[in-house]
Amino acid sequence: MSEIGVLVNILGAASLLLWGLRMVSTGVTRTFGANLRQWINFGAENRLKALGTGFLVTIALQSSTATCLMAASFAGRGLVDAAMAQSIMLGANIGTSAVVKVLTFDVGPLSALLVFIGVALFRSGNGRRRHFARIFIGLGLMLLSLHLLGQSSIPLRDSAQMRQVLHDLDGMPLVGLVLAALIAMVAHSSIASILLILPLATQGAFSVAFGLALILGANLGSAIPPILETSQEKAAVRRVPLGNAIVRLAGCALAFVFLDQIAALMTRITGDGAMHLVDFHVAFNIVLALLFLPLVGPMAKLVRRLRPDETVPDQPGRPKYLDETALGTPRVAIAAATRETLRIGDLIEEMLHRSMEALRSNDLHAANDIAKMDNVVDALHHAVKLYLARLSNEDMEDDERSRASDIMTFVINLEHIGDIVDRNLRELAEKKIKQRLTFSTEGLEELTAMFNQTLENLKVAMTVFVTCDVRLARKLVADKAEVRALERNATESHLSRISSGRRESIETSTLHLDILRDLKRINAHIASVAYPILEQRGELVATRLRPLSFE
């Protein structure tokens, strides 16, 4: 086989391995994502429990990078302190080495069976069953890729040119460490990089010491992607991957000094072949855990010095709850979007208060605040929409898909309310202040009653949005009719005062009627949250029109 053909086969097998790893990680995350996060949260009570939690989560995800990003996210939100996050990562490193150990067993015949089971599950249902199918298919593809890697590397192992290259590199373990680190960094996985190395070690293509340097490089390189992926996050998030990288760097430096002695010891214990590399990989991470677990406190202080809390200017338009690491778990991501939507609702409530204050007290500062708050609402509305759009529609359950759609609809309606308050009510308030107009006592009472009813409906709507309570949803729709009645009665009273020649009513007539109209429109947007809930329960009729009579 030509050199190009060999290279293509190896690259194809390596790609299949990475894809299998991704499928397993994605399937586990979407099946047990919320539980995995709870394990991390509950396991962070003491160092040993955090170590065990990191080990188990990484065994499930088959990716220490995914565990690192989860732990970093929790640390950023203050749910896990830096010391416990480092303990979790020590366990994660042991977990990823245990995965390599398991994959080296001769379980090749299982690959076809696992893929068959996965495809059968995928075709027989959707939702959770399909997530399980991804796990089985991913495991099958990983085992198949290992077989293909072994077959594809045979020409390399038999190649005189390849033996010469490896012989030339054999005396330069530092070069091997750097090369393996680059491979692991590009692959985002120490598992994949080590499994690529093992076929070359099966027939003694290089010395034990050089092979151990490759393993050290794979460990070091896999610590770099989480640092890059969290580079734009706040300091509390960036400390976790940085601490993990420091631990691995210190371990690699220490092991590199005694590389020849360790190679001799591993040869005596496990003999020749590739298994001594796998055993060293496991032993290396266990020793790191034993050495650094008592030092996680000082490590936390060190990374805090290296990544101090920066004084970030207040950015009200920046989302607080949209956790990027939760996107792989739709149920968790939907909960995050719900919390951010509630934050938008609070801003809308404050905007309505400010607009009422500006109209009643001629407060120009309150009117100016409304414009700033609407900019925040627009930014958060955009962020929530993009966040939900990044969820995979195919991988969500029907109820999750429906909930995501309801959140999107409610966020859009809240943004419309913000526009009405900013572009209409604020401008009307500024016009009233600049022209020194005054509402009649009765007119002001009517507008206040309309505002109060609107605010009350908004509070009910937020409760309905969270609880999906049918009784409150019915109340919200019923209150919409009450708002129409309030608006109609207030309009008739206002026109009556104009007919009687009341000067204040005549001067503020346009303002008064426009405010009533805008509040009515706002209430229509508020009530929209109730319709999907009532429609799902069969509580709505098709139209408000009465049927025609043909008598």
Image (cartoon, rainbow, N blue to C red):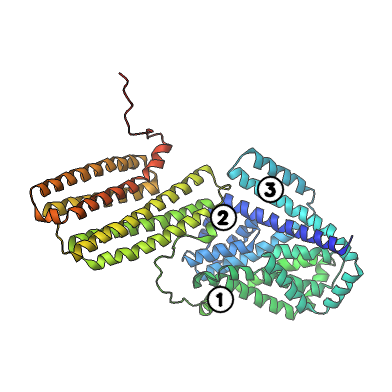
| Figure quadrant of residue 178 | bottom right
Amino acid type of disc 1? Met
Task: Give the SS element for disc 2.
Answer: loop
Q: Point out residue 50 in the picture as x, y percentages from the top left corner.
A: 56, 63
73 lies left or right of 421 = right
Task: Give the SS element for disc 3.
Answer: helix
Q: Point out residue 358 in the picture as x, y percentages from the top left corner.
A: 22, 62
- Other-residue count near label 1 (Cα within 10 Å), few / some / many at <14 / 14–19 / ≥20: many
Amino acid type of disc 2? Gly
Q: Is residue 357 visible?
A: no
Task: Give the SS element for disc 1.
Answer: helix
| Residue under numbered circle 2 | 328
| Residue under numbered circle 1 | 299
290 lies left or right of 421 = right
Check the picture and name the quadrant holding the C terminus.
top left
Q: Is residue 345 visible?
A: yes
Above or below, 333 relative to 532: below
Identify the mark nearer the N-term, 2 or 1: 1
| Residue under numbered circle 3 | 136
- Label 2 vs label 1, nearer the camera: 2
